[in-house]
Amino acid sequence: MRQFIIILLLIGIVFPKSEIGKDIPQKLFQICEELHLQKNCLEGVKIFFAKDIDEMTYLAGGGVPEWGAGIAIPEKDVVIILRVGSIDEQRKVLLHELTHIALHRKLRSRKDNKNIHIPRWFDEGVAQLHYGFNIHRQSQLAWAVLWRNIFPLEALERVNGFVSPHAKVAYAEAHDAALYIENYCTIGALCDSIVSAGDFNEGFLKATGISIYEFYDEWKKHLVRSYILFVLLGDSRFLWVLIVLLFLLLGIMKIIRQRLQMAKLHRQAEIEGWQDPEHFFQDYVDKE
Ligand SMILES: [Zn+2]
């Protein structure tokens, strides 16, 4: 506990209240509580800051992708954050990495206290829950849905090898999938079930009532339902295309209406013996 308080104090002292340490202790308690852990579940975590990606790779001993902004090493209780970007961004990365540590502390089998293997998408998705699902991320996901560039969640096992734009989509997917789980049960209840079963898939089935494979199918359907509309209404490029299409449609409707009027006038001219229905029609259109 003492170590935990020291770390919290250090975060508060090193970073003024308005910066990265702002309401961090409260957030840490929240992370622990959401995983149904004691409030001090992040006790003893060592936090390092790296000035660039090379230093972060050195501190982590390798395994850092070129787009990495932070890394958590649960087996060493270490978190490394890259001091690049805005303070708000670094703060989010810190909470993301600390959530990884809390999640790995939570998911230990009751039988032998060993770590339970969890899919990478779940690990990243839960860690992203404190990141905030902003409009930019939704837009990335929406475009990926539209252009059929969605990665299967299982593919996230290899996310460290992805190029940056693909990794961003993959993280947005993991985040969305973690949010979607909450339609079935809370993340805390799911983690309790996984710990009690000692196995991710079995615990998932017991907590949600559906198998992980059914979940993958349901989540894909949800993506299409949620984001096709978002793409159509939320993206300015699409909005302009829609406006152009609307004008084209209105133009086509006007031409069809004129043709129908013309045909009607021709018929009327035949019946009533007119010589020049086009002139009459032109007068009619001008008056309109
Ligand atoms: Zn992560």
Image: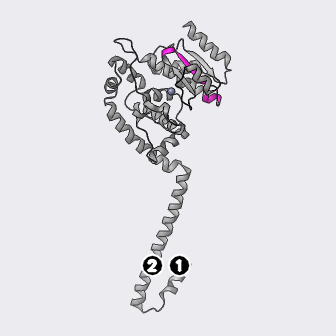
Question: Where does the image place residue 73, in percent across and percent down from the top left?
Answer: 51, 19
Residue 284 lies, with reference to residue 217, above or below; the image says: below
| Residue at 33% over, 33% down | 213
Which of the labelled discs sits on residue 137, or is there none? none
Specify whether tag 2 is near ligand 1 (CB below 8 Å). no
Can you identify the residue that label 1 sits on?
A: 285
| Residue at 52% over, 47% down | 234
Can you identify the residue that label 2 sits on?
A: 261
Q: Quadrant of residue 207?
A: top left
State yes or no: residue 142 in magenta: no
Q: Earlier in the sequence, mark 1 or mark 2?
A: 2
- Within-10-Å neighbours for mark 2: few <14, some 14–19, many 20+: some
Q: Quadrant of residue 17?
A: top right
At label 2, the amino acid type is: Gln
- Please state the extent of the stretch shown in magenta in the rendering: 75-89
- Disc 1 on helix, strand or loop? helix
- Disc 2 on helix, strand or loop? helix
* Circles 1 and 2 in contact, beta carbons < 8 Å: yes
Question: Where does the image place residue 195, in percent across and percent down from the top left?
Answer: 37, 18
- Within-10-Å neighbours for mark 1: few <14, some 14–19, many 20+: few
| Residue at 34% over, 17% down | 196
Q: Is residue 144 left or right of residue 94?
A: left
At label 1, the amino acid type is: Val
